[in-house]
Image (cartoon, grey):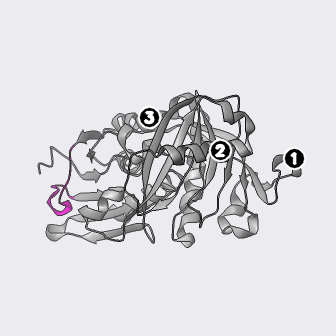
Amino acid sequence: MDSGPGIEVTVVGGGVIGLTTAVVLAERGRRVRVWTREPAERTTSAVAGALWWPYRIEPESLVGEWSLESLAVYEELAEHPDETGVRLVEGVHGGTRLDWLGPWASRVPGLRPAHAGEWAAGTALWARLPLIDMSAHLPWLRERLTAAGGIVEEREVTDLAAVDAPVVVNCAGLGARELVPDPAMRPVRGQLVVVENPGITTWLTSVDPASQSPTYVFPQPGRLLLGGTAEEDDWSLTPDPAVAERIVERCAALRPEIAGARVLEHRVGLRPSRHAVRLEREELPGGRVLVHNYGHGGAGVTVAWGCARRAAALAYPAV
C-alpha cells in the first residue's frame, strides 16, 4: 500500500475514535492520513446517542481519567454548539447513586443526587453533561483534521502490517475482530427510535448495566432519540419493529408526551465491546510502530480525547 508523500501516520478507522486520534496527531505536527472503509456518517459513531458518560467500558481504573480529559474538551467545544455539535444539557440518570460510581464521579461538575421532583421513583443523579449531535460532530472533526493538514481517504485495510507508514494507529473498532485478528471483540447491538420532539429539553436515562433494555431519551436538534438495547453478540443491523415498539413504550412510561410523537427513523449500531480497551504499542519489523486504540464499548465518544492523547503518546513517546 502506497504511503503517499510525507505521510508519517496512518490511522485505520474513521469513526469518532479514529478521527479524534488523527486530529490530536495532526495538531501535534504529524503528517496524518485516515483510511476508513466508509465515511464517518456511516460508521457506528454516527448512530450513537452520544451523551458523555462512561457506559459499558473497561478497565474502570483507566476509564475515569480518559473520560474526564474528554469532558474538559467537550466543555470547551460546547461554547460553539452550532459548529461542533456539542451542547451542555441537563438531565437525570435514573437508578444510580454517587457511591456506586468510580472516583471520577466526584470530579464531574454539578453531578448530584436528584431531588424528589426530578425523579419520581427512587435513586437518581442529576447533571449537566455534554450531549453530542454526531451528525454535526463527525463532519466537524473531519474538517478540523483537514485544517491541521490531515487527509481522509475511503480505503479498506485488510492487513495492518502491510500499511506502508512509519506509524499505524489501529482505530478499527469492531473491525479489529478480523483485522488484528482479535476474537475478544464482540458486538453489543443497540437499537433506537428517532421521533419528533414534543418539547422535551432534558435528557433522561434509566440504565441497569446488566440489562439488555436500557432506557434513554436524548433531545438532539430537530429530533428526539429514544433507546435502547444492549444485545450481546447480536450482529443484526436490521431494526426489529417489536423492539422499537417496546422502546417507545418504555420511554413514554417515563415521559408520557412521547407516546404520540411521530416516528422519523429507526437506527441500529453495534458497539465495539471488549473485556478492556486495547490501548498499547506494538513494534513492527523495520522499526515501524503499530498502536492499538480500540474496544471502547458504549463509551467511544466519552473517552475519545483521553484515549487519543494516550495513543499519540504511545506513537511518539517523549524522549
Mark number, residue 117: 1
Q: Main secondary structure of the magenta part?
A: loop
**Who's the residue at 68% across and 35% down the image?**
258
CA distance separating discs 1 and 3: 37 Å
The residue depicted at 25 percent of the width and 66 percent of the height is 180
* Residue depicted at x 62% and y 41%: 218
**What amino acid type should be assigned to the residue bearing mark 1?**
Gly
Rendering quarter of residue 67: bottom right
What label sits on residue 140 in the rendered view? 3
Q: Is residue 151 left or right of residue 254?
A: left
Q: Which mark is in front, 1 or 3?
A: 1
Residue 161 colored magenta? Answer: yes
- The crowding category of the residue bearing disc 3, from other C-alpha atoms within 10 Å (few below 14, some 14 to 19, many at least 20), is some
Q: Residue type at mark 2: give it.
A: Glu
Quadrant the C terminus occupies: bottom left
Query: Is 168 displayed left or right of 234 in the figure?
Result: left
Q: Is residue 242 above or below residue 79?
A: below
| Circle on res. 253 | none
User: Residue at image x 66%, y 48%?
Assistant: 250
Q: Nearer the viewer, mark 3 or mark 2?
A: 2
Residue 169 on image: x %, y %: 30, 58
Residue 75 place in picture, x, y as percent: 62, 44
Compute the Cα span from label 1 to label 2. 22 Å
Work out which residue is located at the far front of the displayed protein and give it. 242
Task: Mark yes or no: residue 171 visible.
Answer: no
Q: Which residues are magenta?
A: 155-166
Which structural element holds mark 3? Answer: helix
Query: Circle 2 sits on which residue?
Result: 249
Q: Amino acid at mark 3?
A: Trp
Asked if one can make out residue 184 in the rendered structure from this viewpoint, the answer is: yes
